[in-house]
Image (cartoon, helix red, strand yellow):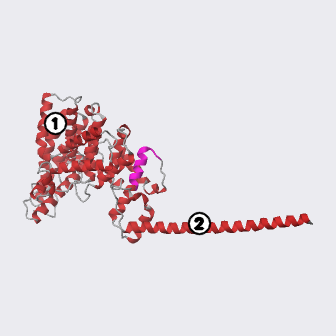
Amino acid sequence: MLFYTHVCLCLYYYYYFYSVFYVIVIHSFGILIGACVIFKQLFSRDVRVRSQVGFQPDRRGSHPYLGIDFRTLHAHAESTGSIPARRIRRLFSFQRHLLSSRFLRGAPHLNPLHILDEDYCGQAKCMLEKVGSWNFDIFLFDRLTNGNSLVTLTLYLLSHYGLIELFQLDMVKVHRFLVLVQEDYHNHNPYHNAVHAADVTQAMHCYLKEPKLAKSLTSCDILLGLLAAATHDLDHPGVNQPFLIKTNHYLAVLYRNTSVLENHHWRSAVGLLRETELLSHLPAEDRLTMERQLGSLILATDISRQNEYLSKFRTHLDQEDLCLGNASHRHFILQMALKCADICNPCRPWELSKQWSEKVTEEFFHQGDIEKKHKLEVSPLCDSENNSIADVQIGFMTYVVEPLFAEWARFSDTRLSQTMLGHLCLNKASWNAMQPEASGSSEEPESEPEPSSRALPQGSLQS
């Protein structure tokens, strides 16, 4: 009897404690579920609030884009339409920046959101495999990277040349530097924008591959060449130096009317290098040397000093005294390569060259409209009433582009040089063929004469 009593008591306490434990567990689980729901609601509200107020990046702090749920933000943007489209693009752009840096490092996707961009990233990656082609379509590449052609292209080239590992560059700092460089270009400029910088960087890569340069340039030369190409027009205001001088702009005063824009581009690039501490791990003397050499390259793009550099280049070629084993001679060739890359648009295939010609002329004419509005003397080539795109381009090709690329072909007589001169000749003929069309259109506005097919590269005028 006593035995059964003990068994009953044991069973009683066992079920009692089990019931209490069960109640506690269920209650705790309920609290946990409630907390998760509340946290999710708070997080969603936080995303909505940040997106509505237009959360802006703080350059000297952690990047705020990392904490934003892109799916929620995208859905919210479509449903309300209250967020500026540019901010949406920048948020998704940063996601693509992360994705591009991952596939450049060969890292697998860690975020299921890659489904949103897998197709575009795949096409952009295919294009990067042919980044050394002179027919590289930077406009298409910019669309595939959602407006991030400069970041994606430069990051790829730095990795391609092994510069990140060689100079022990921090990938986070490299990426942040390139993002800030791209953001400091003005997208409202028809021509001097980040796409132009990406195009110049791609052209610079083509020149760096030329046999004479490829076997002579050091890794430091290549790094400086790519950085100079990416930053050579940084923070360009969309007007030229004479405009800044005659309006007493503070930049003209600061740099005493001498290479005003180029000095500003250089100082802006150095500012971003120091801000991101990209080269902070290098000895101070090496950093200062690289900054000075970067400035020397960017200052060489001053078109007002074109004859000075061209005359020096021609003298070296005539005397056959260029020695690429000499550091100063290598630097001079880098200057000439950057000058060629900066104005190589007339040497591109017609479909690309024509787009660039229209964009640069649009920027010129916009400046002319501003000068007319404020009763200023209209700068040469900026008067839309007295100049056409064909006039501007023919003059530019004849007096600026042809002399430079003829000397470059003397220095580097390769298939690329001949291709560039061939495109230049055909493009100039195309613009010449369009001049009668422009003059005849005022007399017979309803008829549009057919341009001569002999003058058209790639078979047609359409692009």
- Estimate how packed mark 2 is, as few (under 14), some (14 to 19) or many (20 or more) residues with alpha carbons within 10 Å: few
Front one among 13 and 414: 13
**Quadrant of the drawing holding the N terminus:** bottom right
Circle on res. 32? 2
Q: Which residue ends up furthest to the front in the rendered image?
A: 2
**Residue 6, how many percent across, how many down?**
86, 64
**Residue 84, how many percent across, how many down?**
33, 66
- Say which residue appears at 11% left-offset and 66% top-offset: 373
Task: Determine whether the residue tagged by mark 1 lies in a helix, strand or loop.
Answer: helix
Establish if 183 lies above or below 375. above
Residue 240 visible in this rendered orientation of the protein: no
Front one among 154 and 179: 179
Q: Which residue ends up furthest to the right in the rendered image?
A: 1
- Estimate how packed mark 1 is, as few (under 14), some (14 to 19) or many (20 or more) residues with alpha carbons within 10 Å: some
Q: Is residue 52 magenta?
A: no
Establish if 301 lies above or below 45. above
**Horizontal placement of 243 versus 38: left or right?**
left
Mark 1 to mark 2 CA distance (whole Å) = 75 Å
**Horizontal placement of 290 versus 163: left or right?**
left
Query: Residue 116 appears in which quarter of the rendering?
Result: bottom left
Task: Determine whether the residue tagged by mark 2 lies in a helix, strand or loop.
Answer: helix
Establish if 363 lies above or below 173. below
Instruction: Name the residue beneath numbered marker 1.
Output: 407
Q: Range of the magenta residues?
A: 95-107
Look at discs 1 and 2 and give the one toward the viewer: 2
- Say which residue appears at 17% left-offset and 33% top-offset: 410
